[in-house]
Image (spheres, helix red, strand yellow):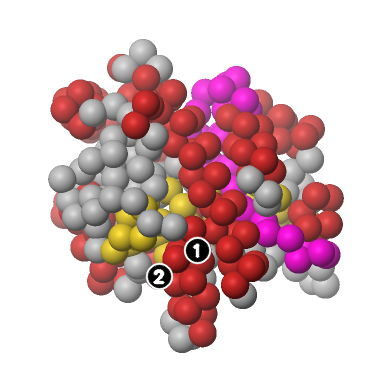
């Protein structure tokens, strides 16, 4: 890859060579979103879902001064076991690469890597967004700005329910990011299928989502699409049950002075503990479900493009 510090995994390089559909995957969910060993098990299962659905997975992480797109099995395991890993967004990607440290990519940084590698579709759990109390803290995830500028279709189960969802939707609208609920009118809320908020757009097939992705490129619009795919019904946690616990986790975060990048990992870990692992199980189910849909979209982009 000329002078880019980009390193494609073997499977990804081969897929690129034959024009096969590829789905990018983030790694912050592995290092900061889930505990060991479920993080590694899930990362492997998500990759296998993508293969079973006829596409090639490309997990993204910074290791050894390279932006890796597609990790070999040993690299995936060492990342999942690692403890001193940077959480990378647009702001820290270059600094991590030149420092030689290991870094896990958030939604924002994974979109950048995917686009550099010519990958159109990316699957994750939930995007970052506007945090509750953002009118005081100004805590708004860089994921939103990235969706506005980098042309990658991101499949998520909505925005994490620890966030202020109405404000997150408002900012996405301001930034011109299409927010597409899949198979329902309501915007899903990560662990729950319902949020009480209507999604701006609805689509019912991978083919339609792929067509919209290609149309945006033809129009030269730039920026990505947020595909909000509800958690499977059998794995969902109803909002009535999760919301009081979110409130408790938020109070604990405030009491302990948790700020900036530490907020999201803290809240996810606390909710995993407060629900006795129920949010972790839902998180695993939804990310696997998103991987399957992302693979179908990637195949449709290839077929229609
Ligand atoms: N989805 C998950 N677990 C996670 C994340 C998403 O199921 O840990 C990560 C993503 O990498 C996302 C990041 O980009 O949380 C958002 O962090 P922040 O709110 O600090 O921008
Ligand atoms: Mn933040």
Query: Residue extending furthest top?
Result: 276
Q: Provide the secondary structure element on which disc 2 rests.
A: helix
Where does the N terminus fall, quadrant-wise? bottom right
Structural crowding at the residue carrying mark 1, measured as other residues with C-alpha within 10 Å and reported as few (<14), some (14–19) or many (≥20): some
Residue at point 28% right, 50% down? 184
Relative side of 242 to 264, left or right: left
Residue at point 62% right, 32% down? 45
Q: Provide the secondary structure element on which disc 1 rests.
A: helix
Q: Position of residue 296 (x, y in %)?
A: 56, 54
Relative side of 85 to 229, left or right: right
Residue at point 44% right, 36% down? 286
Q: Which residue is mark 2?
A: 148
Q: Nearer the viewer, residue 274 or 23?
A: 23
Relative vertical location of residue 128 with respect to residue 192 in this rendering, above or below? below
Mark nearest the camera among 2 and 1 is 1
Q: Is residue 185 magenta?
A: no
Where does the C terminus fall, quadrant-wise? bottom right
Q: Which residues are magenta?
A: 16-41
**Image quadrant of residue 66?**
bottom right
Q: Position of residue 42 (x, y in %)?
A: 58, 30
**Image quadrant of residue 161?**
top left
Q: Which residue is mark 1?
A: 207
């Amino acid at each position: 890859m000329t002078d880019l510090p980009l390193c494609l995994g073997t499977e990804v390089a081969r897929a690129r060579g034959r024009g096969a559909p590829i789905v990018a995957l983030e790694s912050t969910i592995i290092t900061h979103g889930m505990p060991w060993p479920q993080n590694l098990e899930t990362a492997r299962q998500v990759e296998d879902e993508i293969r079973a659905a006829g596409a090639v997975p490309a997990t993204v992480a910074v290791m050894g001064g390279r932006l890796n797109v597609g990790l070999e099995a040993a690299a995936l395991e060492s990342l999942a076991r690692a403890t001193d890993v940077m959480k990378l967004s647009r702001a820290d990607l270059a600094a991590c690469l030149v420092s030689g440290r290991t870094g896990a990519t958030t939604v924002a940084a994974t979109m950048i890597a995917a686009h550099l590698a010519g990958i159109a579709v990316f699957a994750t759990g939930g995007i970052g967004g506007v945090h509750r109390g953002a009118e005081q803290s100004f805590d708004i995830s860089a994921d939103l700005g990235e969706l506005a500028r980098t042309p990658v279709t991101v499949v998520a189960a909505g925005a994490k329910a620890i966030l202020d969802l109405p404000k997150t939707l408002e900012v996405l609208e301001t930034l011109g990011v299409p927010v597409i609920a899949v198979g329902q009118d309501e915007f899903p809320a990560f662990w729950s299928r319902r949020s009480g908020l209507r999604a701006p757009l609805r689509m019912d097939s991978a083919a339609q989502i792929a067509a919209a992705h290609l149309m945006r490129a033809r129009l030269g619009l730039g920026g990505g699409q947020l595909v909000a795919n509800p958690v499977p019904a059998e794995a969902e946690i109803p909002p009535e049950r999760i919301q009081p616990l979110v409130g408790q986790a938020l109070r604990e975060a405030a009491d302990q002075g948790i700020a900036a990048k530490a907020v999201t990992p803290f809240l996810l870990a606390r909710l995993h503990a407060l629900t006795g692992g129920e949010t972790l199980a839902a998180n695993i189910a939804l990310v696997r479900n998103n991987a399957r849909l992302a693979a179908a979209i990637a195949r449709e982009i290839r077929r229609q493009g």
